[in-house]
Amino acid sequence: MRSLLSAIRKIETVFCGLAMATIVAVTLMQVILRYGFHSPTTWAEELVVFLFVWLSFIGADIVLKDKRHIAIDTFYEFLKPGTKAIVKLFINVLILAFLVCLAWATIKLQPVQARHVSVALRIPKRYYSLPCFFMSISMAISVAHDIWLDLFGSAKELTRGA
């Protein structure tokens, strides 16, 4: 499971790096064309927005895998270790349920969005919400893995105990 999560993370990191580089390059090109040559493109802003949407959702998944999302743990730190484990498990189950609902809602939204396209690039609008689906599935895998480890321990502990 760790190798799958690691492979997904590498793909996401490369994608985000390429998306960010493309956003910077296209924005710079647009600025030069607009103010240097007084001839802006019609598609640059739309491409940047499209890539930024993807970058935001995929980046959120990377941050989850690194356990770097913002967390308010003021009261959590005062709990006893056993209670902390129960609260952590409960929160992870809630997160998993939310991610499954989000993935399902994104799938249900696809037929509606498929009827609309972007103005300049003619990209079907459903591609704007696809990163939400991918992010939900990838985050759900990560959270499910965390729940598994919290409940049953690591693979080394399982084989050692057998």
Image (spheres, rainbow, N blue to C red):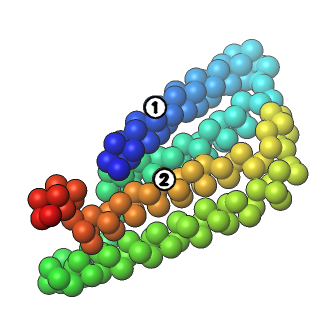
- 160 with respect to 49 (left or right): left
Q: Name the residue under label 1.
A: 14
Q: For the point 46% across and 35% down, which residue is it? A: 11
Residue toward you, 21 or 15: 15
Q: Name the residue under label 2.
A: 138
Residue 20, can we see it? no
- Residue 38 sits in quarter: top right
Mark before the other along the chain sequence, 2 or 1? 1
Residue 114, given in percent of the width and then of the height, sits at 83, 50
Does 103 sit above or below residue 46? below
The answer to whether mark 2 and mark 1 are in CB contact below 8 A is no
- Residue 29 sits in quarter: top right
Q: Which numbered marker is on residue 98?
A: none
Q: Residue furthest front?
A: 162
Q: For the point 34% across and 42% down, which residue is it? A: 3
Q: Looking at the picture, which amino acid does disc 1 mark?
A: Val
Q: Residues within 10 Å of mark 1 (few under 14, many from 20)?
A: few
Residue 82, given in percent of the width and then of the height, sits at 17, 82
Secondary structure under the numbered disc 1 in the rendered image: helix
- Residue 146 sits in quarter: bottom left
- 151 with respect to 125 (left or right): left
